[in-house]
């Protein structure tokens, strides 16, 4: 007995003679097969996605946008998170080095009175 292969999309349909369960590897091929079954008079046509979602015949249009994501490699997919702002650079303070700040001018009130 051969090794079973897992097919991501399962297309099922029922007609007057029985039911058909057909597996397909991509969303576009599964969608094409489901529409063909509907044209051929099958009732209760469904597509089961890899995540376990079952789409009825009136929900097949929801499968189309997914084909763009399926075709891209994981590195090509973009998230919708905003980019972080770069951190502000901090100047390093060395404790052993003297301060480089100039002494600020301070007003002179004259000689202090002695009593």
Image: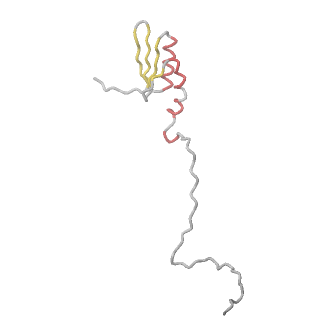
Q: Nearer the viewer, residue 92 or 111?
A: 111
The answer to whether 92 is drawn above or below residue 79 in the figure is below
Describe residue 31's horizontal placement relative to residue 113 as left or right: left
User: Image quarter for residue 105?
Assistant: bottom right
Across the whole image, how many numbered discs are drawn on residues? Answer: 0
Residue drawn at (49%, 23%) of the image: 29
Q: Nearer the viewer, residue 24 or 86?
A: 86
Q: Nearer the viewer, residue 68 or 105?
A: 105
Residue drawn at (44%, 14%) of the image: 13
The image's colour scheme reads secondary structure
Residue drawn at (47%, 11%) of the image: 43
Describe residue 108's horizontal placement relative to residue 5 as left or right: right
Q: Where's residue 99, x and y in %?
A: 58, 77
Q: Residue furthest top?
A: 16
Q: Residue furthest left?
A: 1
Q: Residue furthest bottom?
A: 115
Residue drawn at (56%, 41%) of the image: 80
Q: Where's residue 78, x and y in %?
A: 54, 41
Q: Where's residue 87, x and y in %?
A: 56, 58
The answer to whether 31 is drawn above or below residue 89 in the figure is above
Q: Nearer the viewer, residue 91 or 114?
A: 114
The quarter of the image holding the C terminus is bottom right
User: Image quarter for residue 4?
Assistant: top left
Q: Where's residue 92, x and y in %?
A: 54, 69
The quarter of the image holding the N terminus is top left
The answer to whether 65 is drawn above or below residue 39 in the figure is below
């Amino acid at each position: 007995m051969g090794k079973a292969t897992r097919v991501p999309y399962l297309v099922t349909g029922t007609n007057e003679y029985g039911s058909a369960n057909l597996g397909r590897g991509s969303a576009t091929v599964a969608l094409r097969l489901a529409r063909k079954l509907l044209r051929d008079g099958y009732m209760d046509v469904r597509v089961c996605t890899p995540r376990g979602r079952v789409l009825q015949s009136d929900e097949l249009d929801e499968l189309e946008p997914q084909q763009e994501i399926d075709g891209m490699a994981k590195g090509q997919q973009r998230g919708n998170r905003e980019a972080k702002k770069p951190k502000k650079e901090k100047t390093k303070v060395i404790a052993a080095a003297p301060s480089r700040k100039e002494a600020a001018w301070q007003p002179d009130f004259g000689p202090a009175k002695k009593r």
